[in-house]
Image (spheres, helix red, strand yellow):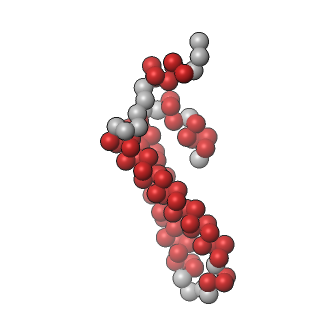
Amino acid sequence: MPAALASMLILTPEDVATCLTTRRGLVEAEIAATEAEMAPLPRIFVLEDEYALALRRAEAEWLRSVVDDLRSGALWWDLSLVKGFAGP
């Protein structure tokens, strides 16, 4: 994920929003699958899974907020802006 985020400037904000929306769907599917697997087990056996779920939920929320900002225009860029920061 960090490498993908580092490369996002070569895409349009719209394309990045699409990619991040896809990622969020995958993360949410992982969350649902993990919750289903954990449901019948005593909590003591799933504490590590709870921790992993907390991280996944935070990622899903972060993805939602970034996509919202991309779609609202609060987060944007264009290649001329990017080239100005890339050096000569």
Q: Name the quarter where the C terminus is drawn.
A: top right
Q: Quadrant of residue 47?
A: bottom right
Q: Is residue 12 above or below residue 33?
A: above
Q: Residue at x 52, y 59 (%)?
A: 58
The answer to which image quadrant residue 39 occupies is bottom right
Q: Position of residue 44 (x, y in %)?
A: 66, 84
Where residue 13 appears, as percent x and y from the top left, is 41, 36
Relative side of 50 to 19, left or right:
right
Vertical arrangement, residue 28 with respect to residue 66, above or below: below
In the image, farthest residue toward the left: 72
Residue 26 percent across, percent down from the top left = 49, 58
Whether residue 45 is situated above or below residue 30 in the rendered picture: below
Q: Is residue 62 left or right of residue 87?
A: left
Residue at the image point whose x is 53% and y is 75% from the top = 35
Position of residue 7 in the picture relative to residue 65 (left or right): right
Q: Answer with the quarter of the image where residue 75 lies.
A: top left
